[in-house]
Amino acid sequence: MFYTQLQAARQGLITPQMKVVAEKEQMSVEALRELVAKGHVVIPCNKNHTSINPEGIGKALRTKINVNLGTSKDCMDYQVEMEKVNQAIAWGAESIMDLSTHGDTAIFRRMLGKECTTMVGTVPIYDSVIHHQKDLAFLTHEDFLSTIRLHAEDGVDFITIHCGITRKTIQQIKEVGRKLNIVSRGGSLVFAWMSMTGKENPFYEYFDDILDICAEYDVTISLGDACRPGCLADATDICQIEELIRLGELVRRARQRGVQVMIEGPGHVPLNQIQANMEIEQTLCEGAPFYVLGPLVTDIAPGYDHITAAIGGAVAGMHGASFLCYVTPAEHLALPNVDDVKEGIMAFKIAAHAADIAKGIPRARDRDDRMAEARQRLDWEAQYSCAMDPEKARAIRESRAPGSEHSETCSMCGKFCAVRSINKALAEDYIDII
Ligand code: SF4
C-alpha cells in the first residue's frame, strides 16, 4: 500500500525521506514526523522522482528557496536550460519550478524527473495550453485534470494550482478597483477562462479529483494566490484576504485526503505589513507552510528587484514564511539570463539565512561565528571558506590587493586596519602606521 508522507506520518511511520530530512535539519526524526503529521511541514517528493534528494519545508526547518526556470519562446534549448538548473543547484537552490511555456514541455520535465536532485514544481495550467494545443477558452476541465495527471506521472513534486478564486472574484476585481488587478500568471489564466466560458473555476470545482491524483503520486499541492498583490497599493486588500480564507478551507480538505499542502503568498507588500500577512496565513491556513514570492517592499526599483524582494523575504522568513521564491534583477523587465539567476539566488540565500538566524534555527549562526573568528585572525582563506560566494569574495580582494607592506589586511584601510591595530594593541606590540 502506498502512503503519502502525510499519511505515513499520521500512521506513525518513518519514511526514508523523513530520515534524510531530519538528518539535514539536525533534528530528531520523531519530531519531524509529528510536524509532517500536523501538516506544519511538507516533504514534496513524488514517488516517480527518482533522482531527488528530499527536503522539508515548514515550521522549525531551515528556510528554503525556489528558482524558476524553463523553456520559453526566446530560449528553446533543453540542454542550456538543464545547465541553468545544475548551476542553480550548485549556487544553492533547493527547488526548481519548471515554468516552461514553449516547445515540447514534456521533454524538459522528464529530464528534471530523471536528473534533478532538488524538488521540482510546475504550474499545470501553463502546460495545459501547450500540451493540448488549444487556446484557453477551448480547454475543458478534463484537459486541466489530464495535464495534472501527466505532471504527476512525470515525477513533479509540487504543483501550483489556483483554486482560491471563484466566479465571485470576477465581480470583486471589477468593483474593488485594484491598481494592478491580477498579476499572477496562472491566476490570470483561470480568471480569463472563467470569464470566457462562464463556468466556475475548474480547479476549485474539481478539487477532489485533483486530490485523488496528488494522493496517488504524493504530489504536494501549492495553493496559488491568484490575487497576490502586484503593487504596494493592492497589498492586504479584500481580494487577497478573501482568497486566503478559501485557501484555508482547501488546506483542510487536502489534509483530510492525505495530500500535503502549502500556501503561496505575496507579492508586493509594504515592510510594515509583512508580519501581519505571515500571521494571518498561519491562522487561516492552520500552520500550512507559507511559500512567498519576495515579497517586494517597494515598486520603484526595476533592475534591483532581487534586493527589494530579498528584504521582504528576510522579514517574511523571520515571521514564519518557510519557502522563498527567488526574484532576479530582471523581474518586471525580461527573461533572466544566467547572471541574473545567480544574483537572484545569492540575494535569496542571504535572505533565507538571515531569517533562519532570526527564527533561532539551531546552529544557523555557526558559519557566521566562524567567519567572525576568521576575520579576527585576518585569515583570508578561512574567510573565503565561510563565504556564501567564495569565488566572488576572493576575486574582489585579489583584484584590489593591498600593498606588500600591509598584505595581511585589505586595501579598504591598509595600515589603518582596525583588526590589525587591536590585535597588536592587545598583544602589546608596536603599531606601525607610517
Ligand atoms: S583593512 Fe579595514 S576592512 Fe580590511 S580587514 Fe582591516 S578593518 Fe577590515
Image: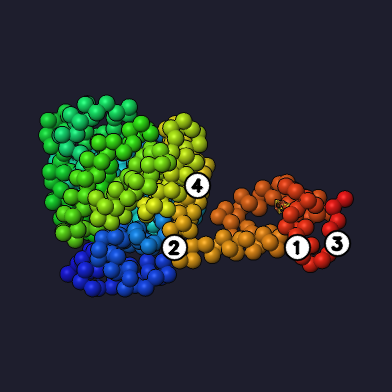
Q: Kindly tell me whether mark 4's CB lies below 8 Å from ligand 1.
A: no
**Can you name the residue that lies furthest to the right here?**
434
Density class for disc 4 (Cα within 10 Å; few <14, some 14-19, many ≥20) is many
Q: Residue at x 50, y 51 (%)?
A: 350
**Residue 56: mark in rendering:** none
Q: In the rendered view, does 422 fall on the left or right side of 367?
A: right
- Relative image position of residue 257 (x, y in whole percent): 16, 59
Q: CA distance from mark 1 to mark 4?
A: 33 Å
Q: CA distance from mark 2 to mark 3?
A: 43 Å
Number of numbered markers = 4
Q: Which residue is mark 1?
A: 423
Q: CA distance from mark 2 to mark 4?
A: 19 Å
Q: Residue at x 52, y 62 (%)?
A: 365
Marked residue nearer the N-terminal end (2 or 4): 4
**What amino acid is at disc 3?**
Tyr
Q: CA distance from mark 4 to mark 3?
A: 42 Å
Marked residue nearer the N-terminal end (1 or 3): 1
Q: Are marks 2 and 4 in contact (CB under 8 Å)?
A: no
**Residue 347: mark in rendering:** 4
Nearer-the-camera pick, 288 or 210:
288
Q: Which residue is mark 3?
A: 430
Density class for disc 2 (Cα within 10 Å; few <14, some 14-19, many ≥20) is some
Q: Is residue 77 visible?
A: no
- Relative image position of residue 322 (x, y in whole percent): 37, 54
Q: Are marks 1 and 4 in contact (CB under 8 Å)?
A: no
